[in-house]
């Protein structure tokens, strides 16, 4: 009889050792029905058992397969709920600000202060599909001043984009946007005798195909850019016709990235080709500004979230013009951004860019430009955030460097998911290479933001 008990015990141990993964899964199923305090409940702690090759499963011991508890993520109590709980969720916001400026027309010789009202509505949507992605945003920004109607401004943008997962290792992405901007006095694009700001429009559409070969991936992107400039009224009663500045810019970009899926660091190389075709040839100065452009970028994609995120590259861009009187324009600089969050309370973003902008001045081909910024946000409390930053932009339009520096400091106080208060102080310094047209502006903004 004793030998029978021994034999049964040996068989039970053998069965347990031959199938440890199944035994662990049973333990996981048992634990998944219990909460942290050992009682039944909906907040069960789920245990993940790693999958192993068949040849290794029979050699795994119970003490070699830990059963860690998955950390619980507490939802943000101040996050707006959004509109709709289906496959597409919408968010809307309206920011209403009171604005005081010390130099409403950014004048270098006769600055005037003024008060204004700013309205900035935003509507966005995003899908929560298991595959593919689609999103979009509509932004408006309107400022009306009490005593200076000519300084009123209306800008905004609309964009949509997404991703289609063709296969596990192949995807197609697309994006389309339309934006309108205002350039005020002091900007090289605005005549010195202009009575108002100069408006420009930018349309951009692009689509890319990415294929993953394992440790290497390639991306081919086709794009089309349209830049258009409105006419500007002059103090003499005339109008500056900017039709010769409008152009189309098709583009082709090919990128090769090294790094497996999920790698924290992925170096890449990208080549671009982007000719520009103007609506009017020749331009106001009798010059042909059609050109051939190209660029080389050597960069690094950084994905070590939530601490480090970013995409930064060293870029060389060049543009050669049809008119022999226009020299080939070249620029070298950094392009991209890096986000650093050393703790959940801090968020620090550094950004940089390099451009070659068209010039309307005679015998000046293109204006190389550079910009950079540092923005810092700190959460004093869960619903109170301090923020500040500095941005610097420079453009070399006619043999000299015009620089614009903006420093800001502000705070956001989220009262509940739907309502927040905000305020900011901002100072702008513009310095022209010629020494004329320099100006400073101080701006104070306080407002209320409604979100859903």
Image: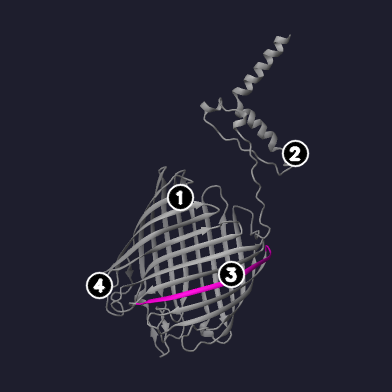
Q: Nearer the viewer, mark 3 or mark 2?
A: 2
Residue 42 in picture, x, y percent from top left: 72, 43
Residue 353 in picture, x, y percent from top left: 42, 65
Dot 3 or dot 2: first in sequence order is: 2
Query: Mark 3 and mark 1: span between their CA atoms?
Result: 37 Å
Dot 2 or dot 4: first in sequence order is: 2
* Nearer to the camera, 123 or 7: 7
The residue depicted at 54 percent of the width and 80 percent of the height is 442
Q: Nearer the viewer, mark 3 or mark 1?
A: 1
Query: Mark 2 and mark 4: span between their CA atoms?
Result: 80 Å
Q: Residue furthest left?
A: 324
Neighbours of disc 3 within 10 Å: few (<14), some (14-19), many (20+): some
Residue 394 in picture, x, y percent from top left: 41, 73
According to the image, label 4 marks what residue? Answer: 323
The image quarter in which residue 145 lies: bottom right
According to the image, label 2 marks what residue? Answer: 38
According to the image, label 3 marks what residue? Answer: 121
- In the picture, measured across the screen, residue 43 lies left or right of residue 369, that is right
Dot 3 or dot 1: first in sequence order is: 3
According to the image, label 1 marks what residue? Answer: 265
Dot 4 or dot 3: first in sequence order is: 3
Q: Nearer the viewer, mark 2 or mark 4?
A: 2
Q: Are marks 2 and 1 in contact (CB under 8 Å)?
A: no
Q: Check if residue 407 falls in the magenta segment.
A: yes
């Amino acid at each position: 009889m004793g030998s029978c008990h021994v034999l049964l015990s040996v068989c039970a141990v053998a069965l347990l050792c031959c199938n440890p993964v199944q035994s662990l899964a049973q333990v996981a199923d048992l634990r998944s029905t219990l909460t942290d305090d050992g009682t039944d409940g909906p907040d069960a702690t789920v245990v993940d058992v790693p999958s192993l090759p068949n040849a290794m499963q029979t050699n795994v011991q119970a003490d070699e397969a830990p059963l860690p508890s998955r950390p619980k993520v507490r939802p943000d109590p101040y996050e707006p709920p959004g509109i709709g709980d289906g496959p597409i969720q919408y968010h809307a916001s309206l920011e209403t600000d009171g604005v005081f400026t010390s130099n409403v027309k950014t004048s270098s010789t006769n600055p005037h202060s003024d008060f204004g009202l700013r309205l900035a509505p935003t509507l966005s949507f995003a899908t929560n599909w298991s595959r593919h992605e689609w999103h979009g945003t509509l932004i408006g920004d309107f400022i009306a001043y009490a005593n200076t109607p000519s300084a009123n401004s209306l800008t905004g943008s609309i964009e949509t984009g997404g991703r289609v997962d063709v296969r596990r290792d192949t995807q197609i992405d697309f994006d389309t946007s339309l934006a309108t901007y205002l350039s005020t006095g002091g900007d090289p694009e605005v005549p010195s005798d202009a009575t108002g700001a100069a408006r420009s429009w930018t349309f951009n559409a692009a689509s890319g195909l990415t294929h993953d070969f394992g440790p290497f991936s390639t991306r081919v992107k086709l794009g089309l850019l349209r830049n258009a400039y409105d006419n500007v009224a002059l103090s003499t009663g005339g109008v500056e016709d900017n039709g010769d500045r409008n152009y189309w810019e098709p583009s082709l970009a090919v990128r090769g990235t090294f790094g497996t899926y999920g790698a924290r660091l992925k170096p890449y190389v990208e080549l671009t080709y982007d000719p520009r075709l103007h609506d009017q040839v020749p331009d106001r100065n009798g010059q042909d500004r059609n050109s051939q452009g190209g660029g080389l970028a050597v960069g690094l994609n950084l994905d070590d979230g939530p601490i480090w995120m970013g995409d930064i590259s060293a870029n060389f861009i060049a543009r050669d013009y049809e008119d022999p009187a226009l020299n080939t324009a070249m620029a070298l600089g950094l392009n991209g951004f890096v986000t650093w969050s050393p703790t959940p309370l801090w968020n620090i973003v550094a950004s940089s860019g390099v451009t070659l902008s068209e010039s309307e001045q005679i015998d000046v081909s293109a204006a190389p430009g550079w910009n950079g910024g540092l923005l810092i946000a700190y959460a004093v409390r869960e619903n109170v955030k301090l923020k500040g930053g500095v941005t610097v932009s420079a453009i070399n339009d006619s043999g000299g460097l015009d620089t614009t520096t903006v420093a800001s400091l502000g705070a956001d106080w989220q009262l509940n998911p739907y309502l927040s208060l905000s305020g900011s102080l901002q100072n702008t310094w513009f310095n022209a290479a010629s020494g004329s047209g320099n100006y400073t502006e101080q701006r104070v903004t306080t407002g209320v933001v409604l979100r859903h």
